[in-house]
Image (tube, grey):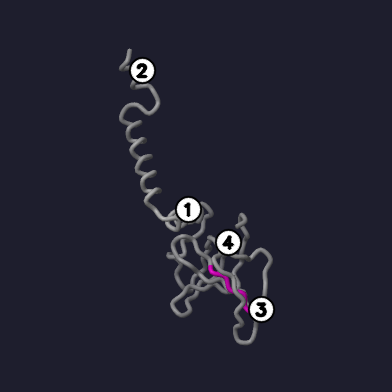
Amino acid sequence: MDEVSASTSPGAGPRGRERGKGGLRRFLRRMASTKAELEAEELQKTTGDEGATPITDCAARKRHCVAGTLRTVTLRPRGGAPALEAELYDGTDVINLVWLGRRKIAGIDPGRRLRAEGLVSEQDGRKVMFNPRYELRGGA
């Protein structure tokens, strides 16, 4: 009777031990990871859930959909015209989003989740997307 109850109780048997070990491994890894590493891991997961391409996989001169969190938002004139620049981070890399002719866009603030789509180019070794279509996601 004891053998039967032990093998049918939750968490018992080989499968239960495997789950317990995996849970302990996950717990120890999370305890040893820095806050930045855990945030990057969470961003990568949500990026995949939104159907976006990881920024590291974005090739120049191709259209891509990216998603992540805005780190910085700055106003930088380009050629005498205003340009709003935002740095988007998805846990793998960053891409600069640039809206030409704009000084401010409602909702484009640091810490905001965003999904953007457009043509990726490269400037000074950094990935850039000019005038992307965007969709604001959950708040900061």
The residue at the point 51 percent across, 59 percent down is 52
Task: Look at label 4 and name its amino acid.
Answer: Gly
Q: Residues under labels 3 and 2: Cα distance?
A: 71 Å
Q: Residues under labels 1 and 2: Cα distance?
A: 39 Å
* Crowd rating for badge 3 (residues with CA inside 10 Å; few <14, some 14–19, many 20+): some
Q: Residues under labels 4 and 3: Cα distance?
A: 23 Å
Q: Nearer the viewer, residue 90 or 35?
A: 35
Pointer 1: what residue? 42
Q: Picture quarter containing residue 136?
A: bottom right
Query: Mark 3 or mark 1: which comes first in sequence?
Result: 1
Please check the rendered image and state whether residue 84 is part of the magenta-colored stretch, yes or no: yes
Q: Please say if 58 is above or below 15.
A: below
Task: Look at label 3 and name its amino acid.
Answer: Gly
Q: Are marks 3 and 1 in contact (CB under 8 Å)?
A: no
Pointer 4: what residue? 111
Pointer 2: what residue? 5
Q: Is residue 123 left or right of residue 9?
A: right
Query: Mark 1 or mark 4: which comes first in sequence?
Result: 1
Which segment did they paint magenta? 83-87
Task: Look at label 1 and name its amino acid.
Answer: Glu
On residue 101, which mark appears?
Answer: 3
Task: Look at label 2 and name its amino acid.
Answer: Ser
The residue at the point 48 percent across, 73 percent down is 127
